[in-house]
Amino acid sequence: MAYTTINKPNLHFNTVTYSGNNTANRSITGVNFQPDFVWIKGRSGTYGAGYNHFLWDSVRGVGKQFYTSDNLAEATNLNNLYSFNNDGFSLGQSSPDAVTNGNSTEFVAWNWKANGSTVSNTQGSITSTVSSNSTNGFSIFTYTGTGASTTTVGHGCSSEPKFVIIKNRSNASGWVTYHYGAGATGLYNPNQASLILNGTNASANPASGGYLSDGYFSNVNSTTLTLRDVNNANNVNANGNNYVGYAFADVKGYSKFGSYVGNGSTDGTFIYTGFKPAFVMAKASSTTGQWSMCDTKRGVAPSGEFLFAEDSGATNSAPANWDFVSNGLKARANYSAHNTSGVTYIYMAFAENPFVSSKGIPTTARWSGLY
């Protein structure tokens, strides 16, 4: 069996950066595929600080946006993003909005490929609409809530997802996430796996920012999610409310989701991924902490940038933060966002290069020494 089935990860996930110019009908290219999920954030300048992370997907349709740095319901604005194109996306249909294309602002866009079309999924008690990519383990699914205290919904992934995000489209509600490594000790426990993407809560501390001790997920398997609408909240299954979910599975040589314990050292914890990362998002799960986002397009060790998924602020520069090597990542600073001693962190990572190609050829990226 081949080490990986994906030799060119940038045909499935890719980061692009661009400078805002406030022009209408602007096409952003260089993505290498037609994205189904686009996440944009101003990094610096006039519209970097104080402006939200913006998210769109092809299942809900162009113009329908969310903000991970807020809990607002879905909004429609074609002047932010109005089309998904063969090699990227277009901004500002008529009157461009500065939050995605403002002058004197640098932007970053993270892009994922699903299937480009949808199918009906009846594997759960709720029928979902799914766009699923069986090669890269990513799916987008939408459904309408029933109000039941416990229900199942088909996620569309080709295997058990390790990371899931769900957002209520109809009402203001937190961004509920499930992560395989978010148990109190960094081990799988679906009852402790709920973290809020627009918050900094710990996964096992009910008092820290919105975590509900029952958990929103009571089971996650290769076909369905079992959801619990805890305390009659509207986060995952309010009657008549519309929802969207993003599900990610591990794919050898392309994506990895796990946990690790920080050591507070410049010779930090090494995390084996099986590929050279292009992007990583990490979050403290045993204590409060931010969702830090780092990628190679904005730089890694010895200098680089962090953005935080729950924060509308501009780039936070943290020299010597992550070292992205050919088979994983290594922390190079005592930094609370990813390497405090004794703290358990979860992470999601996507590849720039697999460690070994499908033909058994090692990549030429820098090796991590003894690891």
Image: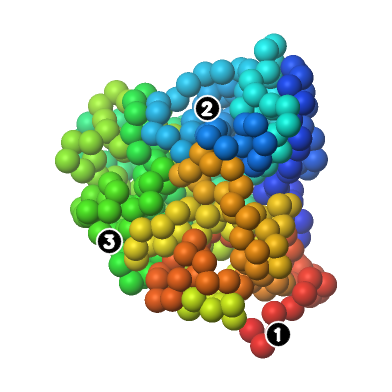
Q: Quadrant of the C terminus?
A: bottom right
For residue 33, the mark is none
Residue type of the residue flagged with mark 1: Gly
Q: In the image, is residue 345 above or below residue 265? A: above
Residue 7 in the image: state x and y as whole percent: 76, 60
Q: Position of residue 239 (x, y in %)?
A: 25, 27
Looking at the rendered structure, the secondary structure element under dot 3 is: loop
The residue under label 3 is 204
Residue at x 46%, y 44% (from the top left corner): 310
Q: Nearer the viewer, residue 62 or 289?
A: 289
**Residue 278 visible somewhere in the drawing:** no
Identify which amino acid the numbered label 2 is placed on: Gln
Q: Is residue 320 above or below residue 121?
A: below
The residue under the point 34% across, 63% down is: 287
Residue shown at 45% from the left, 54% from the top: 290
Q: Which residue is mark 2?
A: 65
Vertical comparison of 297 with 16: above or below = below
Where disc 2 sits, the SS reads strand
In the image, is 226 to the left or to the right of 93? Answer: left
- Which residue reaches farthest top? 94
N-term mark: 3 or 2: 2
Q: Of the residues under marks 2 and 1, which one precedes in the sequence? A: 2
Q: CA distance from mark 3 to mark 2?
A: 30 Å
Q: Earlier in the sequence, mark 3 or mark 1?
A: 3
Q: Residues within 10 Å of mark 2 (few under 14, many from 20)?
A: many
Residue shown at 76% from the left, 19% from the top = 23
Cα separation, mark 2 vs mark 1, equals 43 Å
Helix or strand or loop: what does disc 1 sit on?
loop
Separation of residues labelled 3 and 1 (CA atoms)? 35 Å
Check disc 3 and give the amino acid type. Answer: Ala
Residue bearing the label numbered 1: 369
